[in-house]
Image (cartoon, coloured by chain):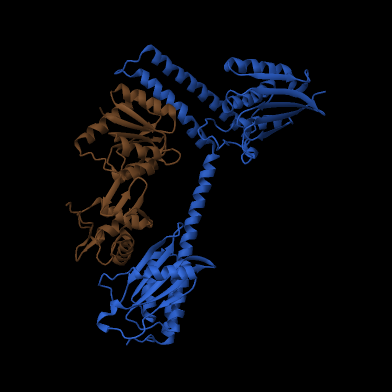
Amino acid sequence: MISNKMQSPIVEIHHLYAISQIVTQNLDWKPALDEIVKLSRAIFIYDNLVVYLTTPKNNLEVVYARAAGRGRSAEAEMAWGDAIAAAVIQKKETVLEEHSGDIQISNRLEYPFLLGIPLFIGDKPLGAIVLIRFGGPAFQDSDIELANFIAQQISLLIEREHLQEQFHQMEEQQQQYRLQNDFVSTITHELRNPLGFIKGYTTTLLRSDAQWDQTTQQEFLNIIDHETDRLQELIDNLLDSARLQSGEMHMQFQPVRLDTVMNDVTIRAKMNHPNLQVQLHLVNSALLVRGDPRRLAQVFENVIGNSVKYAPGSEILITINQEASEALISFEDFGPGVSAQYLPFIFNRFFRSPDIPSMHGSGLGLYICKQIILAHKGSIEASSDADKGLTISIRLPISA
Amino acid sequence: MTRILAVDDEPLYQHLLKVNLEKEGYEVITANNGEEALDMVSSRHPDLVVMDIMMPKLDGLTASERIRQFSNVPIIILTARGEEQDRVRGLNIGADDYMVKPFSATELIARVRAVLRRTSNAEQATQNRYFTHGNLKIDFARAEVWKENKAVFLSATEYRLLIQFAHHVGQVLTAEELLMAIWGPQYREDKEILWVSIARLRQKLEDNPHAPQHIVTRAGLGYLMPPIERD
């Protein structure tokens, strides 16, 4: 008959103290649990200990198992813990399963006495630990108390492990976010595609072991040409963005006629995109602002370019008007527009609409536009009716 | 004719790969992401897969891992410049070679030829993506398990344990081998966690866990999934 009070109370307290010390040391949780099992068995007898954790999919995963006493050398059926673990987690309280009546000492393994204790942090359930005694004796209140103490220590260990993992994940996410805003990594990432195609199709044409017919050669050369333009555009955007960041974008301010600039821009746009329909409404022509004509043209071209990309086939309606002491220039397209959740972010650096992940671009265009307009002491806004189109409105102070 | 599967979410890369490989006399089929790649490997049985890593839905590395569950079709992964850890991970998972973007067309052809040459002698098996053992069925591509056509929900560890047996039918696996393969070297001596996991697997998979048919104990030796006798 095994007595629980094998040691004096002082030795028992010493062991409890040692167990809680393990938790405060920064050991890996597995060797920590190994230690805890060793120490706890000195004050409190049990044969098997199994630790269950619930997974995000509400499954039960066994993360630790120890057969320390009887049944250690037999490959004992250790699945009984499952049912009681599930019960413990569901009821959120300690569950005891014991045999009453006679027990065949010769066949202890047939009579498992099970004590299941929930693992909690606060009221968040983590799982359960199950202690098994083959053939008894029954668990006393003092045993259950000790078992609860051990369960709490194990909860702390597991929670620390979880927190550490979460912390690492968050660090990684932060790192990712930093990278995305990082100039160098954006260059590497964005330039990869056009460079890849230029290299790919050029070397394809250069293959000494292959002949390509005239039409195919033209096709490949056109691709290379197109990708070179994309590359140029990307580099220009990246440079502008860098100049803006370091305050190096110098603009030449002078009196500028908005209608002249806009006419130039729309003619060029129609040349580059022969099927483009642009309607220009100069409600108030001859509006004069103080600005850099080249940079203003850049902004207008960029906005039109976005509509061509994201609303292909749509007509673009451009209006120049006067509102109070400001010139109001609006560009309206009738394409898919931008969803309300992303609208506030479209002027952010490197932002690209998650709605259309395959679209190419640095995400810099509108950011650069906004910076240029701000430098002109103006403002730029976007509004969109889902599926009905996007309107970009630019306001600039009128020059006397 | 040798059939090559080209996987990239960028249509222009699909086109680039296709024109060059077709010029070499290969038949080229394409997929847009990892999920499509899995379907195409199991349905079209390509002789080689060229796959980009960075793709939506299912990335190239995870797709390679899943493909390796049921096929040893040679895989060439395409990585971006400077992403060393992806290359190493890809090779560890079972990719046969890698290529960095941007790449030249001649490099592409040379690598494809080399990998095909290397693997033409080795026994090439795209097994069925489905594995059956009595009333048990495993779909490697979806990582799903069925018992008598009812889905069985296994924990991640239990699933990995089960496919170890599925890949070694008729072969006795020692406790140590299983512990190392699934839990790692730290657990080499920890027999108990293996016992518990096997007991739980049996509860979920066997008609009678005390007289198992799928995962059988060989006393003193280990465990095995016995071959099914054909009548």
Q: Is residue A200 visible?
A: yes
Q: Nearer the viewer, residue B1 or A40?
A: B1
* Colour used to depict chain B in the structure image: brown
Q: Position of residue B172 (x, y in %)?
A: 20, 57
Identity of the residue furthest to the top in this view: A214
Q: Is residue B176 left or right of residue A200?
A: left
Q: Position of residue B128 (x, y in %)?
A: 28, 43
Q: Nearer the viewer, residue A12 or B193?
A: B193
Which part of the image, by quadrant, shows the C terminus of chain A?
top right
Q: Is residue A240 left or right of residue B110?
A: right
Which part of the image, by quadrant, shows the N terminus of chain A?
bottom left
Q: Is residue A23 visible?
A: no
Compared to residue A240, the image places residue B72 above or below, namely below
Q: Quadrant of residue B219?
A: bottom left
The residue drawn where x is 38% and y is 63% is A63
Compared to residue B26, the image places residue A1 above or below, namely below
Q: Quadrant of residue A27?
A: bottom left
The residue drawn where x is 54% and y is 34% is A356
Question: How many numbered marks appear?
Answer: 0
The residue drawn where x is 38% and y is 28% is B103
Q: Is residue A267 left or right of residue B22?
A: right
Q: Position of residue A148 (x, y in %)?
A: 46, 76
Q: Position of residue A347 (x, y in %)?
A: 63, 35
Q: Nearer the viewer, residue A337 or B118?
A: A337
* Colour used to depict chain A in the structure image: blue
Q: Is residue A233 left or right of residue A223?
A: right
Q: Nearer the viewer, residue A111 or A41?
A: A111
